[in-house]
Each structure stands twice: as structure tokens, then as C-alpha cells.
Amino acid sequence: MAPTGSFRREMLEAQAPPAARTGRLRWLQENLFSSWPSALLTLLSLAAILWLVAHVWPWFAHSVWDAGSLTECRAIIRETWGGGASGACFAVIRERWQQFLFGFYPRELYWRPTLAFVLMFAALAPILFAELPRRLRWFAVAFPGIAYWLLWGGPASVPLAVYAGFAIAWLVHRAVAARASELVALVVAVAAMILWWLHLAGPVARALPILELQPVGSSRFGGFTLSLVIGVTGIAFSLPLGILLALGRRSQMFFVTTMCVGFIEFIRGVPLITLLLVASFLLNIFLPPGTNFDIILRVIIMVTLFASAYMAEVIRGGLAALPRGQYEAADALGLDYWKATRLIIMPQALKISIPGIVNTFIGLFKDTTLVAIIGLLDPIGLTTAIRADTNWNGIVWELYGFVALLFFLCCYGMSQYSQYLERKLRTGQR
Amino acid sequence: MSETVIDQPIDRSGMKVSDEVAIEIVGMNKWFGEFHVLRDIDLTVYKGERIVVCGPSGSGKSTLIRCINRLEEHQKGRIAVDGVELTSDLKNIDKIRSEVGMVFQHFNLFPHLTILENCTLAPIWVRKTPKKEAEADAMRFLTKVRIPEQADKYPGQLSGGQQQRVAIARALCMRPKIMLFDEPTSALDPEMIMEVLDTMIELAEEGMTMICVTHEMGFAQAVANRVIFMDQGQIVEQNEPKAFFNNPQSERTKLFLSQILGH
């Protein structure tokens, strides 16, 4: 029979969806026991978890917090829990935790790195959370100087002289741009800034010593303070450097592209540890004799360069993912290259790249532990030193576990923030 | 391609064509690699003219209007927009681009900015209009395209037709002297084509100089004062709409018209 036509006289009203199925039992059934294989997996997983907890728990339960050496720890455990019992000897953490946090920083000056640590959050907050007033970002600009002054001490005029370099560059740029082209002004300004830093900043800072703090040498730095100094500085500088490299790699100017590609490929092709060894041993040979080039500064430069090469590739991926239409629309409105990049291209490319960027940040932060190999006493370096102490010879899990916990907290925090940021920047949904 | 019927009366009082030249293209040629996309294009557009460019796909019509604001670079010949010649001088290019508005097939709104921010961005950063003033201006143009209530939404939350009207408002916020439309309705659902065409008709009624690449022959008949037919990178035929549709001269044009109007 041929199909007959039909038509509707009234349109249907929208109705509420059927009531959601709720309840704990329902959840269990749907997620854990939906079929025989799933039920079996659930039971197996439960058994594995129970087995793990049953073995690890006594170790924590028998832990000793008050002892002077590993031998003492073991004696206490034997006395309290019987011969075969095993237990954690957290006494070592209790004895050495300050060293883990501050390295060999003078004890009476612990307030300085602590204050710098607290101020770091005050500086980060207005950058991380757009809801806060933009004016607070000035503190983020001032923070590196303040942190340097607090950590290394000396007169406050040293970081001020460094900042003065930027002010000089700005003034020179303004003066020259009025008479010559933008490019000439930029070059002259940068030249003036570098000249100031190399030859004038030092003498000026020494001539005007204000707000002098007791100086602390880089050799006293260690522990988690050192990891944070290297990690945070590396993160702060690798992102802008990575953006510039990514833009340079996509540039149409031959030399810019070649230089950026060369840099990225070279740095990515070399292990970080090699760069750190170069920083530690070789750089002094090439520098003029008598120059005192701080070891932490050298390490920071190497770590930053290393991370920025990866960063550049991550951001290049974001740039490539943007539809051509976005570039064309920006061009068609009359925006020049830098404005289009800053207002249209970068915000979108960076948003696409967030997972990769945070990945690189976390990798960089964990890579700071490699400085232990060139003899800096970061948490890993300290662990080796503590294990060499006769009192604590033979202790492993407690120390590395503590270091792992410190790093995990930081990295997990970064990961959580990136997920928050991705949720916040999602604009496409109806 | 079906023909959209424009059944409303069109007010032609503002649609005056002056004898002042808006765009002058002389002997323009362009190649994509070995492929000769545009061949000896000569075209003079007068102020207030409404030109519809049609032709089969690959005939170079989009490339032609994209050369006018230098989204594509021509290799031979000369283009002058409002008296300023297009060369590789970046200052000239940015100046011309800020005077020429463009509407794209795929809208190309900025998805990370709200509708209002999409409209105020270029006036604030290129024209240096104060923010308050730019926002008031943008609201006026959004009202004109009949979507002021969407100002705080993001492009992803709007329908295709609404997005295209925002794109038109965004271009208008720069107070352009010339508007280029690159197949503005080709990516739209049939029900949304009319709302975009209405906006374009209003613009024509106000005397805007417009060049539209489109297959909407109803629109061409209603508002254009010249229809240009292109094939294989050349202008094959151009005429005022009545003569173009009723009495095409070239065989190629006749074939094309029979294909797009035939069903």
C-alpha cells in the first residue's frame, strides 16, 4: 500500500524530562555493578586497595616522631610493637624539616624567605584571578625586586637600579620615537638599557646604599626555597620567551625564522642536564676572568631557555589551530600585526594551549631537582646529604616521600588552577 | 540555488550614484603559484554603487574583492581605494583596511570576546575612540541590525544569522566608506538568509558603496545597480540588473543564469 500523507493540527508543548533516577544503591548499580565483568573488576579493585592499605597502614601507624637516629627509631619500634614490626621513622623529618625548606639559610633570617613566599601569593593572585582589581598587578611587577632583596639581602638600591634600567629604556624610547622610526627607537632604547645595566647600575647602586639587609650568599641557598626560586623564575620568564619564539618561528622574515628554529631545535635536542653542566663548569671558562656570575642565576637562565623552547612549540600548536578567518578578520578591521596578535590571536592561541603550557610548567618545576647533580642542595641534594649522616644512614622512604609530597602539592595546585582557568574561559556554549 | 524573493518595497531615494570614484582597478592580474586566478581586471566603482559579483565557484570573484583590502596581494596592475593606491606600504594598507569594511562567509567573529567587545575593539584600538563613545556607537549599530539584546553574549551563543548581522555591525562600527561582502549568506540556513539580506538592503538604502559576492539573485535584482559576471578569472559581462537577467549577451552568462535560475 502506498504511504498516505499526514499533517499535524497542533504543535506539542514541551514537557519536563522524566524524574532522574537517584539514590545511593542506584549509583552503585550503575557505576560499579552494571554487568558481571564490571562487578568482578570492582571486587578485584577493592581487594587490591585493601591489600595495599593493610600493608602500608602499619608502617604509618608505627611511625616514630621523636628520636635522634635511625637506630634509636628502630629500637623504639621494637619496644612498642614487637620484634617483627616495621614503622616509619619520621623523626628525621622532624629534625631536618627546616633544612628541607630553607637549606643552609641563616636560621635567624628564616623570616625573609618566608615573607617572600607569602608575598609571592599576593603577587600571583591578581594575575591568576581576573576578578581582582587590575591595579594590584603593579605589585606583581614589583615582586621580583622585593623577593630578590629579601632573599639575597644587600641594599634595596640594587633591584631598584635594575628597575631603573626599564624606566631609562622607556624614556629613551619616547625621546627617540619622536624623531626617528619605531624600530630605531626600540633598538636605541634596548641598547641604553643594556649599557645602564652593564656599566652604570652597579656603581650607582653601591653609591646609594639604602635599606640595607644582611647579605646572604647563593651558597647558603638550598632546600625547597631553591626549588621555588628556580622554578618560579623559570616559569615567569619561559612563557613570554616562548611566545616570542613561537611568533618568530611563524614570522615571514627569513633571519628571524631561522634564528628561532635554530634555537628551538638546538635547545630541545640537548638534555637539560648537559645545559646545567655547561652552566656549572664551562661558562666560567668562557667568561672573562674575575667575573662573578652567580651559579643560581646561571641555572635559572639554562632552565628558562630549556623550558621556553618547549613552550614555543606548545604555543605554535595553539597558533596553528586558529582558523585563518581570525587573522583575516583582524586584518580587515585595520589592526596592525602587534595589535592583532595581542588582542585577537594570542588570547585564543594561549587558551587552546593551556594544557600544554601547564604541562611544561610542571615539567620545569620537577626538573629543578636536576640541579642536585651539579652540587646544589635542593631537596634531592639534601636527601643525599642527610643519608650520608651516620645517624640517618639507611633511611629512604621517609625522605623521598616527604620531597615527593612537597612537589606533588605544588604540581597538583598548578593542574587544578589550569582546569579552573579552562572552565572559566569556555565561551562557546549556548 | 533557489532565488530568494524580495517582496518588500525598496526605498531608492538614498541610493544615488555619484560620479566620484570609490575604487579604481586597472589591469590587475594575480596568480596563485602557476594558476592565473585574475586576468586583466578593469573595474571602476563609483561612490554609492551597489555591485553584485556572481559566477561559478573558482571564477576568482572572492579573490577579486579580497584584493581590494589586500587580504590577497595582486601582482600586476593597480588598485586605488578612495584615492590611495595599494602598495606594499603597510601604513597605506592599514589606512585602507580601516576605511573598507568586510563581511565574510563564515562570519569570523572573535569567539573570546562578547558581541559588544567584538564591535568596539577596532574603533578603540585603531580609531582611538574613547571606550564609552565606542560602546554607545556599537549599541546603535547593534540596534540597527536588530540584536541589541545580545550585546553581552558570546558569538558561540548566537545563531548563524545573528552572528552574520553582528559581523555587519562590527564592520559598520569603523564607519567604513565601502563595504565588501564575501558570500555573506552561503553558510546560513535558508530561514536565516532573509534576515541578513534585510540588513544589507537597509544599508543599500542609506547609500553605502557595496560590493557583494553572492548567489542571491533576488537581492541583485532588488538593490544592485550593476551585476558583474565572472568566469575563469575574467569579467565576462557586466550590466544593470534588468538587462543582465533579461537579456544576457555572452553564451557563458546565459548558461550560468539558466543553471541558477532554472529550477
Image (cartoon, grey):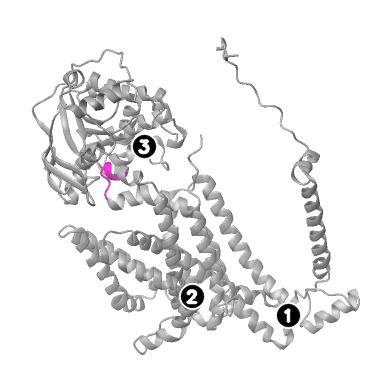
- Amino acid beneath label 2: Leu
Disc 1 or 2, which lies upstream in sequence? 2
Residue nearest the viewer, comparing B112 with A117:
B112
Q: Position of residue A113 (x, y in %)?
A: 55, 70
Circle on res. A304: none
Q: Image quadrant of residue A31?
A: top right
- Picture residue at 68% right of the left edge, 83% below the top: A387
Count of numbered marks? 3
Examine the rendering and report whether any part of residue B143 can be seen: yes
Q: Which residues are magenta?
A: A330-336
Q: Are marks 2 and 3 in contact (CB under 8 Å)?
A: no
Residue A115: % across, % down = 55, 66
Q: Quadrant of the N terminus of chain B?
A: top left
- Identify residue for label 2: A272
SS class of the residue under badge 1?
loop
Identified at 71% across, 32% down, the residue is A20
Residue at the (42%, 86%) spot, across then down: A282
The amino acid sitting under disc 3 is His
Judge if badges 2 and 3 mark residues of a common chain.
Answer: no
Residue A138 lies, in percent from the top left, at 41, 56
Q: Chain of mark 1?
A: A
Report which residue position mark 3 lands on: B106
* Secondary structure of residue under mark 2: helix
Assign the C terminus of chain B to one quadrant of the image.
top left
Q: Chain of mark 3?
A: B
| Residue A162: percent from left, percent from top | 36, 70
Would you say A392 lies left or right of A286 here? right
Asked if marks 1 and 2 fall on the same chain, the answer is yes
